[in-house]
Image: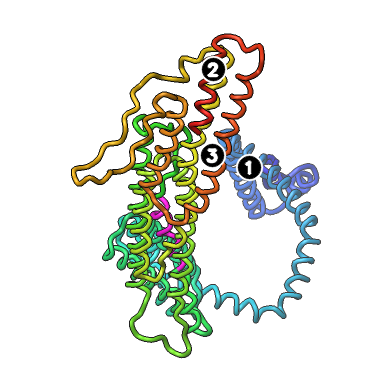
Amino acid sequence: PPSSTLISSPTPTPTGPTKSLLTAGVGVTTTTSTNASNDLDERASAKAALEAAEEILRSLCASHAPTFVAVERRSTALEETLITILTKISVAEPHVSHAHSSLDDDQDESVSAASKLSALAEKHRLRRRTLLQHSSLLELLELPGLMEACIRSGLYEDALSIAAFANALERRHSSTKGAVVTQVVTDVRKREVDLRFHLLHKLKGDVSMPQCLEVVTALRRLNGVELERSKGDVERLFGTMELKLQVAFLEARDLWLDAALVVPDAGIVKDSSKGGGSQSERILDSIDSYRTRCFEISTQFLAIFRTSSPPLPSTHDHSLSLLSMWTTRRIHTFLSTLTSQIRSFHDTASLRDALDSSIFFATSMARMGADFQPLLLPIFQPKVISIVVGYWNEGVANLGEVLKVCRDAGVAAPLYSDASTATTTTTEDGMTSTPAPPRILLTLPPLARLLNSYLSGLNELRRCLLPQTFCELRSHLSKFCEEVESIMSLNERAVLTPGMRGDAMKLREVAKKDERGV
């Protein structure tokens, strides 16, 4: 170690050759001997000082031995670290050479790097300016949510103002095309679709004329907002938007109009006292409600979309033709529904009420050129005939059934009666009133019931008398008489058959009377 080296290097003491030289100079002069003795004293003192210094040094080394050990260890660690660094340097030398070559290649791109730095600086400046407008940007980002809240609250004017502001904002920033502005405008455009849906949904309910005018005005303003950002033939596009608005108005009002129609129940009973009367009342109410709503919609359409001034030569007013098509379609729907509704009627009184309501509906629509009274007769006439003929067929069926039952049972009592057969009465003026039924028929109950059925049918006909029903009723009357004659002939041949059981004589007598009565 270095400490041992320092200790072992004192001034050399005179040894063998030197000593012999000193002893050889004994015979020198006294001055020389004096000098020599002085030299020896100095050497002894120097040796003693050297030994003292060495002792001090040994004590210092002994006291600082840990320091020397630490220094030695650190030197060893330093050597190892230097070796590791040299190894890494040797490994990094290829990468350094590659980096030098890459730097040489990038020297040509220094200009583009400078431009990139300038672009980054510009972006940084823009971001700083953006942060200065933080509050304004927050208000801008809140526009879509604010418009949605206005739509939900029914503040359509405020919502339209926001939509118009979005158009102005888009025009103002059309050159920069910022992402924030583009996103805000896109969100506002989506809210415009929701606003149109809410306005049209409001037309599907019961709205008065002022409310209807307010909604249509809002829809027209919304079309104007869309027209601001359109390009091309603005006049033609405006006409198309107006036509679409008219169609959307009629489609929305159709839903409110369809709610007035009543579909007849499947389980309607024939007797009006058991529910048919209430059903007929609901149908009459539906006809009246349909008439009121249809006339109200037509009036609203004409007041809103029909302009008093003549259209320009370059434009075409399609409002009247559109209203005509809509009215024709709604009348056709009403007649189809009415045809299915009157099937539940089993008396001509209710049928007459429905006819009166329908005629009043037709006369109301006649003020707009939509009179459909001629279309009502083909609907009500078959129903009147079916009701009248139904009574007649029921009487014929009852007659045949009674004769068959009595013939099979051999009983003649239900077929005749001993009731009085008085003549008809006269009035005070000596003129006969409405001819009474022949009282002789009281002696023949089956024929009397047949006559009652026939007269009931005529009474039903009197309640709803339609002029064009007589020709068809005559044919049904001829058929009715033929069926009655056939039943009576069949009964007479059956009772005249030999081997008849029961009261055969009385049955044959009643059969002859019935044949003469017919």
Residue 38 in view: yes
Q: Is residue 334 left or right of residue 205?
A: right
- Residue 333 position, x and y percent, is 48, 56
Q: What kind of residue is marked 2?
A: Leu
Disc ID at residue 476: none
According to the image, label 3 marks what residue?
480
According to the image, label 1 marks what residue?
71
> Is residue 299 or residue 38 the one in the foreground?
299
> Is residue 356 or residue 6 the one in the foreground?
356
Q: Nearer the viewer, mark 3 or mark 1?
A: 3
Q: Which residues are magenta?
A: 247-259
**Mark 3 crowd level (few <14, some 14–19, many ≥20, 10 Å Cα):** some
According to the image, label 2 marks what residue?
507
Q: Are marks 2 and 1 in contact (CB under 8 Å)?
A: no
Q: Is residue 171 above or below residue 370?
A: below
Label 2 to label 1, Cα distance in Å? 156 Å
Q: Nearer the viewer, mark 2 or mark 1?
A: 2
